Amino acid sequence: MTKHVPAPAPRPLRAAFAALGGSLVIAACGGGSDGGGGLLFPINPPAPAPAPAPAPQPAPLGTLDGSVPLVIGHRGLPGLFPEETQKAYEAAADAGADSLETDLHLTKDCVLVARHNPWLSDNTNITDVAKTNSTVAARKRTVPGVLVDVKYPPVAENGPPQYLSDLTDPSDPKSVLKSLIVDGENHTNDWSITDFTMAELKQWIAGTTYDARDQRPTELNGKLPILSFQEVIDIAKAKAKATGRTITVYPETKNPIWNNAQAIANGCGPAGSHPLEDALLKIMNFNDLNRKDAPIFVQSFEPESLKYLRSAGMRARAVQLVDGNDVYTFVDGRPYSWTLAGNPKWFGEMLTPAGLAEVKTYADGIGPWKPQVMAHTIVPFVAGKGLADVNTIKPTSLIADAHKAGLFVHSYTFRNEAKYLAGIYKGDPVAEYLAYFRAGIDGVFSDFANTAFAARQTYLKETGR
C-alpha cells in the first residue's frame, strides 16, 4: 500500500506564515477554519492619515506684556473734527481707538474741563466771540509778567538765565489772576480758561481745530461746545457699552503748578494745596476709576503732579510724559518744578537707566516724543536740513531700556500731514506707524485714530494675527 505524505509547503508561504507570527487570529468558533478548511487572516483597518501640520504660531509682539499696542485718540480725532469735542471723541471711538486722551484744567468754579491750552485764542472761537460780547472781551489778560532769576547756575548750557512769572506781586497770591504767564511762557493779551465758569464756557465758547489748522476741516469750528472731563468719561462709557470693547480715558494734569496757583487764587483750595490733582482723584473715585485695572491712564509732564497723586491715594496707572522739542522754552526743556527748585537737568535725564528706575517708583509707563524712540538721521549728514530730509530711522535703546525697567512706552504724536512725517516715509503715515509697531511700541498717541487703527491691522496681519 502506497502511503501518501503531504508535500512540504512552498518556502515562500512558510516564510509568510512565520512573518505573521502572533498576529494570526483563530476564529472563535471555527477552530481556525473558515468552514472550507482555510485559515483566517486578520483584516486590519487602514493606517490613519497623518495629522495635519499645526498652524504656524503668530510672531510674538514686542510690547511690554505681549499685548496688542494701543491706539490712543489724541484729543479725540482732531484730524477730522475740532479737538476735544464730543464729535471728536465719539469719532475716535468709532474709528477703533482704545483710549480717549484729554488735557485737563480747572475752571473758575473748580470744574475739570477738557481743553488743550489754558489760553483760549488758539483752540477756541473766543476771539470772534469777544467782538460782540463785551463781558468776554473785558476778561482778556493784559498785565505783563515779571522776570525772575533762575536758581541754578545761569550758564548757557542751562538755558535762559531768567524766566517770566505771573506772580507780579509776591505779597498777593491772587495777583496770578492778572497776567497770563504759563510755566514761564508768555501769553499776555489772551484769555485764560481759569477766568470762566464751566457754564460760561458752554454758553459762550466753542472748540476749534489746532494743529495743522490750515489743512484740516474747519466747517465745525465754533459750533461744538467745550466739554467737562465728566462728559469725556461718559462718552467713553457709552461707547464701551455699545461696542463691547474696553475704552479707556487718558487725562493729563496740564500745567499743574500754574493750574494750582490759579485755582487757589479762585478759592478752589487753601494755600499749598493741589486743587487740580484733588479734583481728578475725586472724579476718579466717583466713577470707580481709582483701581490698578481701571480703564484710565493718568499722564503728566510734571513728575511732582504724579508723585502727589500717588501719595494722595491714586492706584490707577500713571504715565510720565517726556518732552524733547528741539526749540527750548521753559515748558518743554525741563519740568517746571525743576526750574523752580533750581534743578538744571533736562527732560532727557528721565530716559537714562537711572532716570527710568526713578520713574518706575511712581509711574507705570512713559510717554516720550517720537524721535526719542526712533532716531531720525540724514545720511550723509548735511547741515541745515530738516525732517523732510530724514532718510534713515533706527530704534534707539529706549523701548528696550523702559521694558527692562518694567515701564510701557506710549509715544506722541502721530499725524497724517506730510509736514509731520520724516522724509523716509514718503508722505505715507502708515509707514511711520509700522516702524514704531515693529520696534515694540506699546501705544501711539494719534490725531488720526482711523489711520492708526488701519496701520495696526496691517501690522497684526504681518505677525500672523
Image: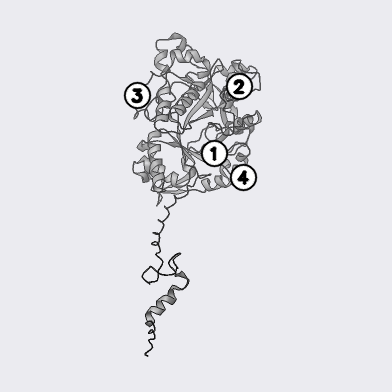
SS class, disc 3? loop
The amino acid at mark 1 is: Ile
Rendered image coloring scheme: one colour
Q: Please give the label number shown on residue 354.
A: 4
Q: CA distance from mark 3 to mark 1?
A: 33 Å
Q: CA distance from mark 3 to mark 4?
A: 45 Å
Q: CA distance from mark 2 to mark 4?
A: 31 Å
Instruction: Give coordinates of residue 99: x percent, y percent.
Output: 47, 32
Q: Residues within 10 Å of mark 4 (few under 14, many from 20)?
A: few
Q: Residues within 10 Å of mark 1 (few under 14, many from 20)?
A: many
Judging by the rendered image, the residue that carries numbered circle 2 is 275
The amino acid at mark 2 is: Pro
Judging by the rendered image, the residue that carries numbered circle 3 is 218
**Mark toward the start of the polypeptide (3 vs 4):** 3
Observer-nearest residue: 404 or 353?
404
Q: CA distance from mark 2 to mark 3?
A: 35 Å
**Mark toward the start of the polypeptide (1 vs 4):** 4
Q: Quadrant of residue 94?
A: top left
Pair 1/4: label in front: 1
SS class, disc 2? helix
Q: Is residue 348 left or right of residue 436?
A: right
Furthest-bottom residue in view?
A: 1
- The reply to whether residue 340 is in sight is no
- Dots 1, 4 in contact, CB < 8 A: no
The amino acid at mark 3 is: Thr
- The reply to whether residue 236 is in sight is yes
Instruction: Give coordinates of residue 203: x percent, y percent.
Output: 45, 12
**Mark toward the start of the polypeptide (2 vs 4):** 2
Judging by the rendered image, the residue that carries numbered circle 1 is 366
Q: In which quadrant is the C terminus drawn? A: top left
